[in-house]
Image (cartoon, rainbow, N blue to C red):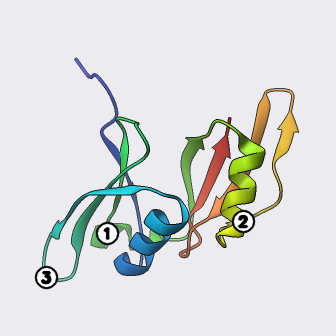
Amino acid sequence: MIKLLKFCTIPVSDQDRALAFYTEKLGFKVSADQRFDESQRWIELQIGNSATGVVLFTPPQHADRIGTHTGMSFKCDDLEKTYAAMVERGVEFLGPPRRESWGASAQFKDPDGNLFVMSE
């Protein structure tokens, strides 16, 4: 039976730039960084203590997905505090956190324009 989601892939145009963003601005940790083929590396990142990670890799047939809505939502303990810290580090948000009847969230972009949601 399926136990968990191991990783999600984030399509990126420049792996070095993406690696710097995800580690320096978001605080993710490198769990694997190895040559995949002559043009790309397999870069797997750990998110805090989560069992699910992200991979900075773009299969050639998925290059058109770079800079789109990822459908990924990251959870944090304190949305306002995390938002402020990320803004201070230069992360681009579409706007400040919004509170709705279902909860609070904010949307941010990576250097390629990939869009993510962050919530409590």
- Residue 81 lies, with reference to residue 86, above or below; the image says above
**Foreground pick, 54 / 24:** 24
Kind of residue indicated by mark 3:
Glu
Q: Quadrant of the N terminus?
A: top left
- Residue at position x 59%, y 71% in the image: 113
Report the side of 110 relative to 41 (left or right).
Answer: right
Q: Which residue is mark 2?
A: 87
**Displayed quadrant of residue 107:** bottom right
| Residue 9: % across, % down | 37, 55
Residue 115 rendering spot, x and y as whole percentages = 61, 60
Secondary structure of the residue carrying tag 3 is loop
Mark nearer the N terminus (1 vs 3)? 3
The one of 71 and 18 positioned closer to us in this rendering: 18
The residue lying at 86 percent from left, 27 percent from top is 101
Viewer-nearest of discs 3 and 2 = 2
Of the two numbered discs 1 and 2 on the same chain, state the one appearing first in sequence: 1
Residue shown at the point (85%, 45%) measured from the top left? 98
Residue kind at label 1, given as amino acid type? Gln
Where does label 1 land, which residue?
Answer: 61
Q: Position of residue 69 (x, y in %)?
A: 59, 58
Mark closest to the chain's N terminus, 3 or 2: 3
Amino acid type of the residue tagged 2 in the rendering: Val
Q: Which residue is mark 3?
A: 38
Residue 109 to residue 31: above or below = below
Q: CA distance from mark 1 to mark 2?
A: 33 Å
Q: Quadrant of residue 58?
A: bottom left
Q: Label 2: state its secondary structure.
A: helix
